[in-house]
Image (cartoon, helix red, strand yellow):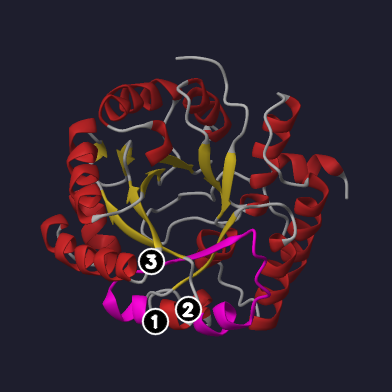
Amino acid sequence: MGKLPKFVQIKEVGPRDGLQNEKKWVSTESKIAWINMLSNTGIKEIEFSSFVNPKMIPALSDAREVGKQISRNPNVVYSALVPNQKGLEYALEAGIDGASVFMSASETHNQKNINKTIQDTYPVLKQVIEEAKAEDKHVTAYISTVFDCPYEGKMKPDAVISICEKLLEYGVDDLSLGDTIGSAVPSQVETLLDDILKKYPTEKVILHFHDTRGMAIANIMTAMNYGIYRFDSSIGGLGGCPYAPGAAGNVATNDVLYLLHRMGVETSINEKRIQEASLYIQNQLGKILPSRSLLASGL
């Protein structure tokens, strides 16, 4: 372990991971206006939607319209979740810069989330990855439940690494390792990173923490001490996983920025604009978002 990184890169996943679990419909126009606000905060990557079957995630059924109508900032990568070849076709039509594929380290969670075994998921993802790379798109692989599974309990690092190896072999550019149920503590992060970083460089690794038990900031600090400098977060702490009962939202972008900026770590992101975009979506949803720094700001 060493010093904290000088710069941390945040991927904003609120428009996808944040909204996917919301019961209240946010209009296409409001989504577009919100993503346009986020595009002007200094964030370098926004995951704007998901191209899964609309029946599975009704909240994001307008992914194509959103992708086609957002105002593109040339300094921002606009990515989306892509489950299969059909989803990739729609995503390319909508103008993605990056594709995110996904599977679980846990067999049971994978079956509930994707309705396939891990072995049956590989050929589907291989096709998506190869076709996205042929279109010159950046590809990130999300691996869920890398620490704990709501159905199987603790996961072994070896199970995670075997999936990483397969997906890197298929051509993914980086790996986003997810604490899907927000149960991990720093010692688990250390155990996984001790093994992962023996095999892969830090620039290949992104961490994706949910804040169900309030551990996400502690886990981010632990990961930064290992040199990890890329994290996913969700504005206001929006989100949850439809197939992980009780999981709260991703760590709030607002809270991560509060931590980083006050520790002298740069991000290029404007906190005031993040707070304004948080209030906008909070008003659209008609509920208070859980971000501590948003609540404390009194805006």
Q: Quadrant of the N terminus?
A: top left
Q: Which residue is mark 2?
A: 58
Q: Which residues are magenta?
A: 64-89
The magenta stretch spans residue 268: no
The spot of residue 273 in percent (x, y) is 80, 54
Mark 1 and mark 2 residues within 8 Å of each other at the beta carbon: yes
Q: Kindly identify the residue that appears in the image at 25 percent across and 65 percent down.
A: 130
> Tag on residue 55?
1
Q: Which residue is mark 3?
A: 136
Q: Earlier in the sequence, mark 1 or mark 3?
A: 1
Circle 3: residue type: Asp
Quick one: label 3, few (<14), some, or many (20+) residues within 10 Å? few
Q: Nearer the viewer, mark 3 or mark 2?
A: 3
The spot of residue 257 in percent (x, y) is 69, 38
Quarter of the view holding residue 98: bottom left
Residue farthest along the right direction in this orientation: 299
Residue farthest along the top direction in this orientation: 2
Q: Kindly identify the residue that appears in the image at 74 percent across and 57 percent down.
A: 278
Q: Kindly identify the residue that appears in the image at 73 percent across and 74 percent down.
A: 33
Q: Secondary structure at mark 3?
A: loop
Q: Secondary structure at mark 1?
A: loop
Q: Secondary structure at mark 2?
A: helix
